[in-house]
Image (spheres, helix red, strand yellow):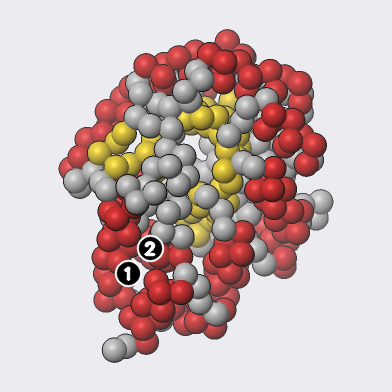
Amino acid sequence: MDQQRRLIDKLQETSQLAKEEWVALIQNRNQDAAQYLFEKARRLQHQYFGNKIYTRGLIEFTNYCKNDCYYCGIRRSNKKAQRYRLSREQIMECCQDGYGLGFRTFVLQGGEDGWFTQEALEELVDTIKTTYPDCAVTLSLGERSRESYEGLFRAGADRYLLRHETADEAHYESLHPKELSAERRKQCLWDLKEIGYQTGTGFMVGSPGQTPQHLAEDLLFIRELQPHMVGIGPFIPHHDTPFAAEKEGTVELTLFLTGLLRLMLPKALLPATTALGTIDPSGREKAILAGANVVMPNLSPTSVRKKYELYDNKICTGDEAAECRNCLNQRMEKIGYQLITDRGDYGCNCSKG
Ligand code: SAH
């Protein structure tokens, strides 16, 4: 049997590989290996989740950000970004619409915006949880102190998404200004896990300067962290950032990594990301068929959608939440899957316990 298949078998049996093995698997990947991998990934996905796809309603509630990440369209140095903040009433309206459409998880995502104080955020989480006690609240607010994460958890937040972006310190420095570090980012993730959040990490695929060695380090870090969720999507340049002229990541590598993640973390929640749907019209369907099991349609008011522009040509910026939901419903049904109304917590969703 060839080396690729042997490594894929080993990954499935032991849930891990050594760094050189990850590098070899990624570097020498080919179509045959990908098909072999995706079949295994789908088998695990079916074993644990059947044909069910979980949905999370994404509310992009502010695009103000104090950070200056070189890849991101809402970085503070982008003076052309039209900034907005949703009011508490607007956010609650998004939840109301979302609830009516069957969403039982609300994801509050934004730039690192100090205008929303700790107190205001805790109040917001509390209001959502009190109004919708059967829903999960996921936060994606970037790096905060341990105390802040603890306070938000006490206020009722269930989950937190914070991609580590790249596990390699030097690569991290090439993507971020010097006040940000991979070490700090990873520490936040360890804190979140310890506090008790269902924790999600992830990274961009094909970010400038990324090598198979970096990806191997990402997979080793994820193996160590044992997150509940992992979001990966291709890097896509934004025209008003220092990386405007860089190449975007590929669908092919993103799918391959999705398959590897499903084998390494069989029960994990893996989203088919909007970024993947942006570089390929059927990218999200392909991700599901490579092992992903979550979609995160947008619930933000259409008036602000275009302004939350992390990268160019982001899809679904003109559609109402209901349209997004219907569109995804149809897309999933076409490939034999079904969107479901369920909180979709880690571990509780498995047909196998
Ligand atoms: N500020 C929050 C959440 C918003 S950014 C945080 O730091 O977590 C959400 C994710 O979008 C980032 O983690 C990054 O991986 C991704 N992203 C940002 N710019 C991107 C780009 N140009 N292409 C693809 N993904 C990007």
Q: Residue at x 69, y 43 (%)?
A: 195
Give the amino acid at mark 1: Leu
Left/right of residue 37 with respect to residue 199 in the rendered view: left
Within the image, what quadrant is residue 151 found in?
Answer: top right
* Nearest the eye: 128 or 284: 128
* Nearest the eye: 152 or 282: 152
Question: Which of the image's four quarters has the N terminus?
Answer: bottom left
Above or below residue 241? Residue 217 is: below
Left/right of residue 258 with respect to residue 196 in the rendered view: left
Q: Residue at x 27, y 61 (%)?
A: 43
* Residue 283 in view, yes or no: no
| Mark 2 Cβ inside 8 Å of ligand 1 | no
Q: Earlier in the sequence, mark 2 or mark 1?
A: 1
Label 2 with label 1: CB-CB less than 8 Å: yes
Above or below residue 261? Residue 295 is: above
Which mark identifies residue 37? 1
Q: Residue furthest top?
A: 89
Circle 1 crowding by C-alpha within 10 Å: few under 14, some 14–19, many from 20: many
Q: Residue furthest front?
A: 353
* Residue 344 in view, yes or no: yes
Within the image, what quadrant is residue 138 found in?
Answer: top right
Q: Secondary structure at mark 2?
A: helix
Q: Position of residue 234 (x, y in %)?
A: 47, 55
Q: Position of residue 192 (x, y in %)?
A: 68, 45
Within the image, what quadrant is residue 314 found in?
Answer: top left
Q: Secondary structure at mark 1?
A: helix
How far apart are labels 2 and 1 at the CA level? 6 Å
* Nearest the eye: 115 or 84: 115
Above or below residue 353? Residue 136 is: above
Residue placed under numbered mark 2 in the picture = 259
Circle 2 crowding by C-alpha within 10 Å: few under 14, some 14–19, many from 20: many
Q: Residue at x 37, y 87 (%)?
A: 3
